[in-house]
Image (spheres, rainbow, N blue to C red):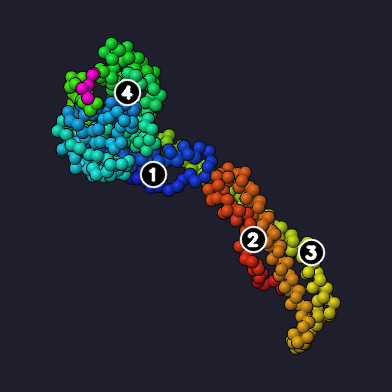
Amino acid sequence: MDLLAALEALRRPLDRELFPLAVGEAASDRRAQRELAGQLDDYLLPRLRALDAPLLAVVGGSTGAGKSTLVNSLVGADVTEPGVLRPTTLVPTLVVSPADRAWFMGQNVLPGLSRATGTGPGALRVVTSDALGAGLALLDAPDIDSVVVANRELAAQLLAAADLWLFVTTAARYADEVPWSFLRSARERSTALALVLDRVPPDAVGPVSRDLSRLLAENGLDGTLLFTVPEAVLPAEKARLPADTVRPISSWLSGLAADAAERSRVVRQTLSGALDSLATRVPALAQAVERQQAAFDGLRSIVAGAYAGGLADFDAGMRDGSLLRGEVLARWQDFIGTGDLMRSLESRVGWLRDRIVGFFTGRVPELQLRDALESGVEALIRGAADGAAERALEGWSAAPGGPGLLERIGPMESARLGRPGQAFGVGGPRVAGVRP
């Protein structure tokens, strides 16, 4: 099996609900499942199917870092919508070369997002720009720390789908924890990365840049390409940055678009890192699935043990003479006392004669005995089943995964699980084959 086929096989079971029980860190396990499925769909599988496809660079960062303004300034056109309101980037904008438009308009990258016409979460707006050379696209992502959960999740999804991160931070927020959690993730997965330090006061360019370089080294990101954009007074909120302040970034991107070998190196770095990360992510997910299976086995064992005990109770009740009390004992004494027991052992003619006589005289103690026995056996079955159900319910209430499962099905269904005797109906079933 080749690599692509192996990843396709890995992807297939990820659509199932693998973590229905509240066992261990189930919420975290579900998130890891979604993230793995998303990266397979959005990056690994598409990239392996087309290694020479255009490179996708995602521009990500914190709220108010200036991502949209940077993208507009790099392409020299107002392709995205910066603003003072937060969150700003509501619909991610993908800027592509006219030569690459057909590739990105298809479902080759980010197949779960609609194209062009969408205006809400889950849509991807695609615009073309002659400023970008063929082979490279820029995607303006939502804020990684957005107050809107859907935006944060979409930002993480887009970054996981990127060949290259162009990560934007500011002089005021470069030490915040949220950006560094993403940067450490990039390090762990060997994602190709360039950092833009934006809105730096002219007199702070040197000190802030040095401190940021120190933090990069301390977090295992020494050598990361770092661009600094000085703070500029813009005539309007939607104005673009001066061309000379972003020229080092635009020149680097232009060179990347023009150099197929360098693009290939970036793709190989990020692809290899994403594949290597599977060596720890997939076994961890498999162990979480095994915990779920162990919890299911435990719940089944509780039920099996409870009903095995109920069956043993029923068997003991049939053997210990408990049926020969009350109504059954009275009918048994009637049956013995009338001499019908001996007559039932006589010839078939005699037996038929007694039944006919008994019918007209109203004396049929053997039928009454049978009915009493059936009622007694039914009561014994009901009692054993109810006891087993109660034990099973009590066991589930204390077992791993049980309380969450009971809460999930609701109090009414849980109560029904504890009273299976209701399934026998109002009058109860007749127990076929039971004869005195």
Q: Which mark's residue is nearer the viewer, 4 or 1? A: 4
- Local secondary structure at mark 1: helix
**Do the CB atoms of the residues marked 2 and 3 lie less than 8 Å apart?**
no
- Residue type, mark 3 in image: Gly
- Local secondary structure at mark 2: helix
Res. 262 in view: no
- In reply to whether residue 235 is colored magenta, the answer given is yes
> Residue 197, located in which quarter of the rendered image?
top left
Upstream in the sequence, badge 4 or badge 1? 1
The residue that label 2 is drawn on is: 421
> Residue 223, located in which quarter of the rendered image?
top left
Report how far apart the C-alphas of labels 2 and 3 lie in the structure. Answer: 23 Å
> Residue 259, located in which quarter of the rendered image?
top left
**Do the CB atoms of the residues marked 2 and 1 lie less than 8 Å apart?**
no
- Local secondary structure at mark 4: strand
The residue that label 1 is drawn on is: 10
Q: Main secondary structure of the magenta part?
A: loop
Q: Residue furthest left?
A: 130
Residue 104 vs 384, above or below: the answer is above
Classify the position of the C terminus by image quarter. Answer: bottom right
Q: Which mark's residue is nearer the viewer, 3 or 1? A: 3
- Magenta range is 232-236
Q: Which mark's residue is nearer the viewer, 2 or 3? A: 2
Residue 170 placed where, x, y %?
32, 21
Label 1 environment density (alpha carbons within 10 Å; few <14, some 14–19, many ≥20)? some
Report how far apart the C-alphas of labels 3 and 4 lie in the structure. Answer: 83 Å
The residue that label 4 is drawn on is: 169
Measuring 31% from the left and 26% from the top, which residue is drawn there? Answer: 64
Residue 107 vs 247, above or below: the answer is below
Label 4 environment density (alpha carbons within 10 Å; few <14, some 14–19, many ≥20)? many
